[in-house]
Amino acid sequence: MIKFDAKKTGIFAAGVAFGTAGIKVLTSKDAKKLYTNCTAAVLRAKSCIMKTASTIQENAEDIYAEAQQINEERESAEEVVEDAAEETIEDTTDFKEETEETKEEGSEE
C-alpha cells in the first residue's frame, strides 16, 4: 500500500495553487501596465545616460585637441629657442675667428 503524507501533499497543493495564482497575477492587465511603465523608465534612463556619455566624450575630445595644440606650441617655441641658440653659437664662432684674424694681422706687422 502507498502511504500518503498529508503535510507533504498539502504543501504541494499550496505550491500549485500559489504558482497558478502567481501566473495569473503576472499576466494580468495591471502587471502588464507595471511592466510597460518600468520598461519606459528604463528607456528614459538609457536616453539620459547616453546623452551624458556623449557630452563627456565631446568634452574629452575638446581636452585632447587643446592638449595637442599646447604641445605643438611648446615644440615650436623650443625650435625658436634652439634656432636662436644656434645663431648665438655661430655669431660667437664668427667673432672668435675675426678676433684671431685680427690678432694674426697685428702680430704680422
Image (spheres, rainbow, N blue to C red):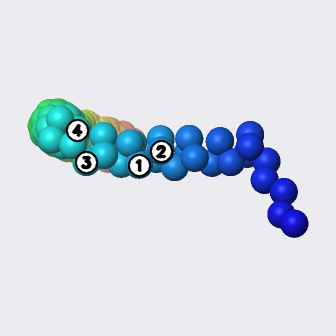
Q: Choose mark 3 or mark 1, whichever is in front.
A: 1
Which residue, as the protein is rendered here, is positioned at the far right? 1
Q: Nearer the viewer, residue 78 or 20?
A: 20
Whether the residues at callouts 3 and 4 have beta carbons within 8 Å, the answer is yes
Q: CA distance from mark 3 to mark 4?
A: 6 Å
Quadrant of the image occupied by residue 91: top left
Camera sees residue 93:
no
Q: Residue at x 36, y 48 (%)?
A: 23
Q: Position of residue 21 (x, y in %)?
A: 38, 42
- Badge 3: few (under 14), some or many (20 or more) residues near its Cα, within 10 Å? few
Q: Nearer the viewer, residue 86 or 13?
A: 13
Whether the residues at callouts 2 and 1 have beta carbons within 8 Å, the answer is yes
Drawn side of residue 51 relative to residue 35, left or right: left
Q: Which residue is mark 2?
A: 17
Q: Which residue is mark 4?
A: 31
Q: Which residue is mark 3?
A: 27
Q: Residue at x 21, y 43 (%)?
A: 28
Q: Which residue is mark 1?
A: 20
Label located before the other in sequence (1 or 4): 1
Whether the residues at callouts 2 and 4 have beta carbons within 8 Å, the answer is no
